[in-house]
Amino acid sequence: MLILVGAFIVIAATLGGFMLAGGNPLVLMHVSEFVVILGVAGGVLVIASPAHTMIELIHKIKHAISGKPAGKSDYVEILKFLYEIFMVGRRNGLIALEEHVMNPDKSAIFAKYPVLTAHPERLKFLLNGMKPVIEGKIKPDQLEMLMTAEMNSKAEESSHPVHLMQMVGDSLPAIGIVAAVLGIINTMSAISEGPAAVGEKVAAALTGTLLGIFVAYGFVNPIAYRINTLNLGDTQILRCIMTAVSGFAKGHSPLIAVEIARRTLESTVQPDADELENILKALPSGK
């Protein structure tokens, strides 16, 4: 919910500064300007994107508002899972992994880690990486290339809503100018009504320009950046899984495969090596 705090700061700072200068916030409330700017922006959104991208954008915005990026504890859970599942394969052979990988909803190991099972994209990526190895359909040294291609495809797909939102954000200042020009045209037709009427209409026109810039740089572009940051976090999780799975497939021990994956993480979410090793060794499978 930190995004709501930021939104409050943006609005409070803007209106607060305006009021300190002697302005009345009510003079900014011109419904016609809101209709033009938000309506045109919505139309641009519809014109520029297919329906599935708009639906995905809505989901991304909801996640940006109510969700949070994966933290250190989430990565520890992912690494713990990878270690446990690798230990099963190490001790009992790859065939022992089949009952877990082919039926993850019935696996006792998978059930312990909602950080994976509650996110279909992460779970599918993991299963797509492990199934070919278990079935012997791919050589271990080919696996990383296969998983990299899938990861890049998912990253590209997740960037479409970001590009769409950035396009709308970049368009909003110009849409605000359109609203202002319409307001000036309306003003020209009301010159005979006197200075007071003209002043009110000019203020309404200028509000259109203000609103376009304010919404673009105060909300739309920052939300697009936040969505992109969350996307990068999702990609980092997939890279972590890919590195560990491909390392294990190449013959590395579970501990080494997990350690290689740990080192791919950013410092803000990367658990300490000794700390992680102690956590892994404390697992039932680590004894």
Image (cartoon, grey):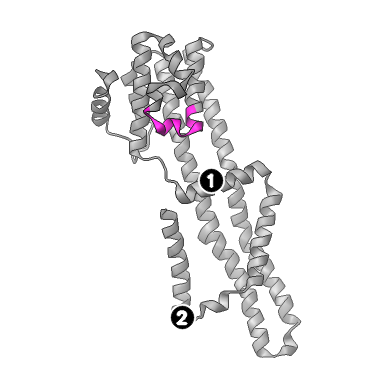
Q: CA distance from mark 1 to mark 2?
A: 38 Å
Q: Answer above or below: position of 150 versus 174.
A: above
Splitting the image into 4 quarters, where does residue 156 fall?
top right
The circle drawn on residue 60 is 1
Q: Residue 198 versus residue 27: which sits nearer the camera?
A: 27
Splitting the image into 4 quarters, where does residue 59 fall?
top right
Compared across the picture, whether 27 is left or right of 50 comes to left
Residue assigned mark 2: 21
Labels 1 and 2: the sequence-earlier one: 2
Q: Residue 197: in sight, yes or no?
A: yes
The amino acid type, in three-letter code, at marker 1 is Lys
Task: Determine whether the residue tagged by mark 1 lies in a helix, strand or loop.
Answer: helix
Locate residue 135, reporting x and y percent: 51, 11
Q: Nearer the viewer, mark 1 or mark 2?
A: 1
283 drawn magenta = no
Locate residue 102, reporting x and y percent: 49, 17
Task: Determine whether the residue tagged by mark 2 lies in a helix, strand or loop.
Answer: loop
Q: What residue do we see at 46% from left, 78% from top?
A: 19
